[in-house]
Amino acid sequence: MCKKLMFLVVFVLMVSQACNAVEVARWDFEETSGTTATDQSGLYVATLGGSDTLDVDGRFGSGIDFAGDGGAVFDAAGSEAFRFTGDFSISLWINSDVEFGAHTRFIDISVADGGLTDSYRLFTHSGDDTDNFKFMSRQDGSNTQNIHTRDMAAGTWILLVVRHALDGDVTMNVLLDGDSVDTAFVAANSESWPTAGPIVYAEGELKLGRMNGTSRKFDGQMDALAFYDEVLTDDQVVNIFYTSGGSEYPLASGPKPADGAMLSDTWVNLSWRPGDFAISHDMYVGDNFDNVDSGAEGTFLGNQADTFIVVGFPGFAFPDGLVPGTTYYWRIDEVNEAEPNSPWKGKVWSFSVPPKTAYFPDPANEAEGVSVDVQLSWTGGYGSKLHTVYFGETFDEVDNATGGSSQGSAEFTPGTLKMAKTYYWRVDEFDSVETHKGDVWSFTTEGAVAALNPANGAVDVTQTPVLTWAPGLGASYEIFFGTDAGALEKKGSGNLGSESYEPGQLEWNTTYYWRVDEANNANVDSPWTGPLWSFTTANFLIIDDMESYNDINEGEPGSNRIYNAWVDGFDDPLNGSTVGHLDPPFYEETIVHSGNKSMPFTYDNAVGKSEATLTLTSNNDWTINGVGTLTIWYRGSNNNAAETMYVTLNGSSTVDNDNPDAALSARWTEWNISLQAFADQGVNLANVNSITLGLGNRTNPVAGGSGMLYFDDIRLYAPAP
């Protein structure tokens, strides 16, 4: 530690009783409001920037939400405490709202961006389709980079740990919420490198969720950030995983086998880490999630003091054995009659018993773009001894095949295949007693057409989709479509360059199938039957999910720029709105509620109001299927001016958001509006021709402030059954 701090009477080291680690500072981010976050000692304060807030769920209690436009900064004096010169450790939980970008910052202490101006930083390393955790530190004349190889995914709480031993190794851990963490797991997860030497420090403040400049900012949540003046042990890392390093955790955790695991047998020893107050444990096991979650009759196995239970073995629960091919669910409630909050209901975990049939085919079922020299493989069914492979060019041929030759290995090489062709295969498993017929799998080789929109297997698809695909080897095509996969109807044909089809108004919550066959007279293998694709329409009406917009130049075929659909105030001096970014991509790709796009909306109410209007070319009947609620998702910033948010139908009927500070919400927020509110103002809900989103007072404009919002997923819902 810096010698100067040793003489400060106010500087104390806190000892965490939960993990016996010497903490320099720890932030639990429990403020829930305000623009500063203070550590447990009260000595170190981080000031939030941009739209960052403390009003968000964390990994433990509340957390800090980085909106991707700010980041927290410590003052120069406070930053001195974290210029470690010897042994130290850092731990923090993160949960990203978006896919990680290259060099996204979590922690950075530097005077400028990059090079030898960084003292140390914790950030992402992205490349080769991976997102990994990187720790970089500055030594005399060089930088040392250490990269943990475990991929990190958005939408998952992740514990990142750096352990820096000056005379030993730099050790890193990446632990995911849901991992079954114990000391053995931590040791196996640890990746280490010899420490390059003492860290050389430049000037500059300690920053969270950002670097010095405007780029590489973190968009997501952080919680339980702690700095330690020692190298944590594996045991201490385990405690930090479950308790944040300082808080007691009442729930059962650390399930073994891990949540979602596939067993190798028909019995299992279930164990868990007990909650910090537990005296005994109520146990629930069953093959139905809802029954286990509700504690339905037949799932309760009893209360016991031990933290393990055997199931699927004679003399225990499920004495006849677990059923192959079945997924089981289990839950542990922690009990302490002396505690008023007892029992503490646990999470529902699951495990699966392998089926007796072959599973986990490679390539995956319905895979596309497969090499013509593919080698097929699979995981043998439970208890299997021999495998019989059937391979062919039609489903029926393979499904009806019999009398094949058995083999011992779980691999099969069909030889060089044709391009742009769908093949079918099946593996039957013999377990010394009987043969278990396998499912028929398929794959399509490279060179075939490929579905672009909707993607194969997509759900919540609009009822008026435009089907598009990438061409394969053909010069012409025929498209087939319908609800019966075995009896598709030919719907049209065309030549290369017109790869789209509009099936018209579709039913709600219905699965549709489609296929594109190609032909090319110049190719001896022509024609080619395309792969079978499917999608399921939404059980709600999609007014605009923002996914159809593009940056194709205006006037060119297929151009659909977002600001041409949502007409803003560009040519209207009485309308202060601007839709879209100023430069391509005009839609937003990072700050989205769902899918890949949202609508940026800038407002400047110096002119009184700001609004944008979409003219509806479809989905005009807002009485269909009994819909009764209009839902709009939006996200603002606490830097925005508080202006009334409103929605208008047909240019005449307006409903205001009940929250006068809606524009200040730094998280995605759902706004539900009863359609009756529009009907009461005279709107014909059977013929809605436009929808307007705006900020301000539409009927009596008054000069006001400015800001920026994002809108996404405008939908209509029917009442819940």
Image (spheres, grey):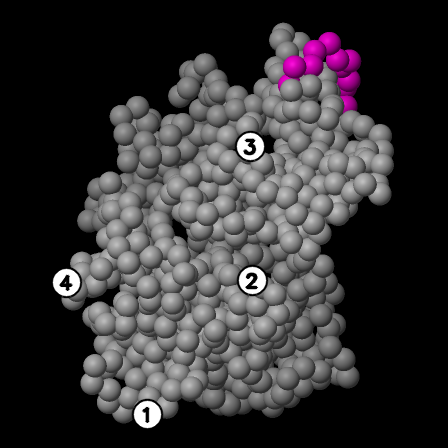
- Mark 2 to mark 4: distance in Å? 43 Å
The label nearer to you, 2 versus 4, is 4
Dot 1 alpha-carbon crowd within 10 angstroms: few under 14, some 14 to 19, many 20 or more: some
The residue lying at 78 percent from left, 42 percent from top is 520
Mark 1: amino acid: Ala
Name the residue: 48% across, 20% down. 323
Residue at the disc numbered 4: 680
Q: Residue at x 43, y 85 (%)?
A: 570
Q: What distance separates the C-alpha of mark 2 from that of mark 1? A: 36 Å
Q: Which residue is mark 3?
A: 488
Q: Which residues are magenta?
A: 399-410
Q: CB atoms at circles 2 and 3 under 8 Å apart? A: no
Q: Nearer the viewer, mark 1 or mark 3?
A: 3
Q: Earlier in the sequence, mark 2 or mark 1?
A: 2
- Asked whether residue 44 is in view, the answer is no
Relative side of 425 to 673, left or right: right
Amino acid residing under circle 3: Leu
Question: Mark 2 highlights which residue?
Answer: 99
Q: Nearer the viewer, residue 58 or 517?
A: 517
Q: Secondary structure at mark 2?
A: loop
